[in-house]
Image (cartoon, helix red, strand yellow):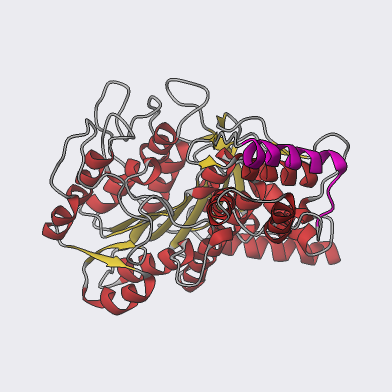
């Protein structure tokens, strides 16, 4: 009898989650670099942090539909973000580096453009710059992902209603390094209101028809801070999602499509920084929670899809013996990048006269070493040897990754932390691993099972009637 009741409950819940009807409201979340193990690792980390073995589920992994996707590009089995993003935005494979154009250079219609053509409001948002590869492939058409100025000039042509991110990387300089008119007057002429900071958004948004939301004045245009580094007043993806809903539902009876990217999961994985990566996954899940609250009010008309453009780093959960120690990661208080900048500041403040005891105190505060996190003699020797090179012999060779350069001691401290946590990495770049797919709401049944990344926008279009 119990089994029958459980089966009935499952059928009823599944029936509600698979509610038929056209998806009027579409949320498309992309966790850049978020492979299967980034998700699984985050859930196991949260469980260990709470003092138990197992998983503490993220919201989006509890959605009734789960699948997986292949990510190869037209030019290589390992994709870059532009080609993978183009597959997710257009349903067509292209060569690495291309932004919403096919291998022959022809522009491809994006799902966002199709939604706009059908009369829907459209938003594109990210935690990195608005002209970066993944957001760009939804509104721009350029041959190279690094054509930041040219990508930005495509933004006002799109006519989309909402954009958000850290800013624009080259607002006055073309790809061939020539000075050019600022893109901001172009935005203004096209009717966009640039709003800086979430508090300002709440005050100004009511009178704005089209919005470009950026962080408060004085913030970096490169990206929003990592979740692990965020301070009060910093813009985050959950706030961006709230702002997107506000703008896209205003005076709108037709519906909307919005793409929201957790862009720095990828950056943390390029750095092989497990603690920072897992916190980024949680940060995106917090944004999904905002969308899910909207879904609960419109369950028969809302579709939420979560996936990734590719996996980054080839993260392995368990090294050597069959053990994990993810709970140690909770004592890492900052990203490798902030750790690096603080080591540089320490060096400067003491005119490079930094003692080993100074370093031990510093790493104890920032990484928990010797305090909450015991380290072996071998691990301490790695840190001490790097200290000798960097501070005694003054041989400072910064470690480079895709998006950062780090003090060698910061890189070594992160390496030791990952070693303690029993987390391994295959590389500092993208891999060809499967990406997860999760969905809930109208049309979500279309996302069951294995698929290619090009199938995802086609299925969203089918669910929404674009």
Q: Position of residue 193 (x, y in %)?
A: 21, 65
Residue 82 vertical placement versus 73 (above, below): below
Q: Position of residue 154 (x, y in %)?
A: 21, 44
Q: Can residue 265 be seen in this view?
A: yes
Residue at 55 percent across and 32 percent down: it is 429
The image quadrant where one finds the N terminus is: bottom right
The verdict on residue 380 being magenta is: yes
Residue at 66 percent across and 30 percent down: it is 426
Residue 255 vertical placement versus 155 (above, below): below
Residue at 72 percent across and 64 percent down: it is 8
Q: Nearer the viewer, residue 453 or 182?
A: 182
Q: Nearer the viewer, residue 68 or 299?
A: 68
- What range of the chain is rendered magenta? 373-393
Q: Where is residue 394 in the image (x, y as percent from the top left)?
A: 60, 37
Taking the view exactly as shown, the residue that stands out farthest to the bottom is: 203
Residue at 24 percent across and 46 percent down: it is 152
Quadrant for residue 218, please give it.
bottom left
Secondary structure mostly seen in magenta is helix
Left or right: 55, with 344 as reference point:
right
Q: Position of residue 132 (x, y in %)?
A: 36, 43
- Report how many numbered discs are placed on residues in the image: 0
Left or right: 81, with 432 as reference point:
left
Left or right: 427, with 378 as reference point:
left
Residue 422 vertical placement versus 343 (above, below): above
Quadrant for residue 13, please give it.
bottom right
Q: Nearer the viewer, residue 312 or 56?
A: 312
């Amino acid at each position: 009898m119990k089994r029958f009741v459980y089966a009935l409950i499952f059928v009823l819940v599944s029936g509600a989650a698979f509610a038929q009807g056209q998806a009027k409201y579409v949320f498309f979340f992309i966790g850049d670099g978020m492979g299967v193990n980034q998700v699984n690792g985050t859930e196991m980390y949260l469980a260990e942090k709470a003092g138990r073995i197992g998983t503490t589920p993220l919201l989006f992994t509890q959605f009734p539909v789960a699948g997986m996707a292949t990510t190869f590009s037209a030019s290589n089995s390992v994709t870059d973000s532009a080609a993978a993003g183009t597959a997710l935005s257009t349903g067509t494979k292209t060569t690495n580096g291309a932004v919403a154009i096919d291998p022959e250079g022809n522009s491809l219609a994006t799902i966002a453009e199709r939604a706009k053509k059908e009369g829907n409001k459209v938003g594109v948002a990210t935690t990195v710059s608005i002209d970066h590869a993944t957001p760009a492939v939804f509104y721009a058409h350029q041959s190279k992902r690094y054509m930041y100025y040219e990508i930005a000039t495509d933004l006002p042509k799109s006519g989309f209603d909402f954009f958000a991110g850290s800013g624009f990387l080259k607002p006055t300089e073309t790809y061939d390094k020539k000075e050019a008119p600022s893109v901001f007057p172009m935005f203004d002429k096209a009717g966009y209101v640039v709003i800086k900071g979430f508090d300002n958004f709440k005050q100004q948004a009511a009178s704005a028809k089209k919005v470009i939301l950026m962080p408060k004045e004085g913030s970096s245009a490169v990206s929003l801070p990592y979740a692990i580094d965020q301070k009060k007043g910093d813009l985050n993806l959950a706030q961006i999602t709230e702002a997107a809903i506000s703008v896209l539902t205003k005076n709108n009876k037709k519906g909307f499509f919005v793409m929201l990217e957790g862009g720095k999961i990828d950056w943390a994985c390029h750095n092989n920084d497990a603690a920072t990566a897992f916190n980024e996954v949680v940060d995106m899940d917090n944004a999904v929670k905002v969308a899910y609250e909207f879904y609960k009010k419109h369950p028969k008309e809302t579709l939420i899809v979560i996936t990734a453009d590719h996996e980054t780093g080839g993260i392995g959960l368990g090294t050597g013996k069959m053990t994990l120690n993810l709970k140690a990661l909770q004592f890492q208080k900052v990203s490798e990048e902030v750790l690096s900048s603080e080591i540089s500041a320490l060096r400067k403040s003491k005119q490079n006269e930094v003692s080993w005891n100074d370093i031990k105190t510093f790493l104890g505060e920032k990484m928990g070493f010797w305090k909450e996190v015991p380290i072996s003699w071998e691990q301490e020797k790695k840190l001490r040897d790097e200290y000798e090179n960097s501070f005694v012999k003054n041989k400072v060779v910064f470690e480079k990754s895709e998006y950062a350069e780090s003090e060698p001691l910061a890189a070594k401290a992160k390496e030791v932390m990952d070693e303690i946590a029993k987390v391994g990495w295959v590389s500092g770049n993208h891999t060809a691993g499967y990406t997860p797919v999760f969905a809930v709401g109208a049309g979500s049944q279309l996302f069951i099972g294995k698929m290619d990344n090009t199938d995802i926008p086609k299925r969203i279009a089918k669910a929404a009637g674009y």
